[in-house]
Image: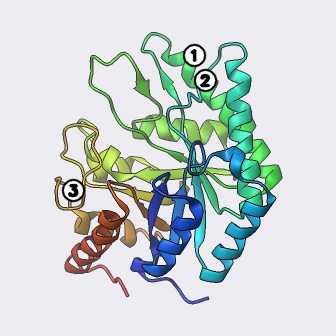
Amino acid sequence: MARKTLKQRIGIDIGRRVSVEEGIEWAATHDVDIIDVQTDIHPNALESFDDARIEGITQALDKHGIQLGLHTLSGVNIAEFSPFCRDAVDNYLKAYIDLAVKLGAGWIVVHGGYHFTACKTLRMQTAIDRLKRIAGYAEEKGVLLLLENLNWEPVLAEVNYMPVTPAETMHFLTQIDSPALRWSFTANHAHFLPGVGIDKFIDAMDFSYCREVRLADNNGAYEIHQRPGEGTIDFGAMFKKIEAMGYQGHYTNGFTTLDDMLAGRDYMLARAKEAGVKID
């Protein structure tokens, strides 16, 4: 199989902006080879994926040669330990894995949950234990999970995501130690992490874990998914650093509208080319 160009490797986060079916047709029309979708609520509520819908989606993916990933909701607390709720979180993740098998999805983006400051240690261990169980289930089903590094919250915030720092991200990955769990690097989250930034974040990680790089611009101050060029990320330098490491996986644009993400791909490719990155 011929090696994909950088353009072919930059996918689009459909999310729940349109139905999976519409997203596939949109991607095919606009020469997009990779998409991911969220299947929590309308128009892609998980319960709506009956046999007929699944068959139509898999046929469309095959027809257009499009790779599909799924993306769980970060608002579901993977670090939940309360009775009844904890079982529901396990069932939620297993349902995503089961759907991925039926759709032939190549990966599922997952998260480490969130804590409430005083209970960080307990919540983090709960999240790690849960993801270890779920990774075991994913191994049985042949599904790849990608753990996303999430966004830093202001110092006085009571609620904070996990993992946020390179140390936390590596802690999750090494504690779980499963071939079914790898890393989704969200560059814009790293960009505004105080005292870190994209370069230092990458340098502090074992980048061999990375299977996806998620992209949006950011103002360097707080969580906001901006169009490329609106924030302060140097996309040329970012692509140059990552590609020079031998990374051959995919990227995913995740910001504003579908049209913005399509235009943003062209902007990113132009910046990469200016930085001397081979894009063809």
Disc 2/disc 1 C-alpha distance (Å): 5 Å
Q: Is residue 239 left or right of residue 122?
A: left
Disc 3/disc 2 C-alpha distance (Å): 33 Å
Residue that label 2 marks: 125
Q: Secondary structure at mark 3?
A: loop
Corner quadrant of residue 272? bottom left
> Which comes before the other along the chain, label 3 or label 2?
2
Circles 2, 1 touching at the beta carbon (< 8 Å): yes
Q: Quadrant of the N terminus?
A: bottom right
Residue that label 1 marks: 122
Residue beneath the point at 78% across and 62% down:
52
Residue that label 3 marks: 233
- The location of residue 51, given as percent across then percent down, is 80, 59
Q: Secondary structure at mark 1?
A: helix
- The location of residue 20, given as percent across then percent down, is 58, 61
Residue beneath the point at 58% across and 75% down:
66
Disc 1/disc 3 C-alpha distance (Å): 34 Å
Corner quadrant of residue 6? bottom left
The residue lying toward the viewer, choosing from 205 and 236, is 236
Q: Residue furthest top?
A: 118
Looking at the rendered structure, the kind of residue marked 3 is Ile
Work out whether residue 235 can be spotted. yes
Q: Secondary structure at mark 2?
A: helix
As drawn, 123 above or below 135: above
Tell me the crowding category of disc 3: few under 14, some 14 to 19, or many 20 or more residues within 10 angstroms, Cα based: many
As drawn, 110 above or below 108: above
Q: Quadrant of the C terminus?
A: bottom left
As drawn, 132 above or below 116: below
Looking at the rendered structure, the kind of residue marked 2 is Gln
Q: Is residue 192 left or right of residue 49?
A: left
Looking at the rendered structure, the kind of residue marked 1 is Leu
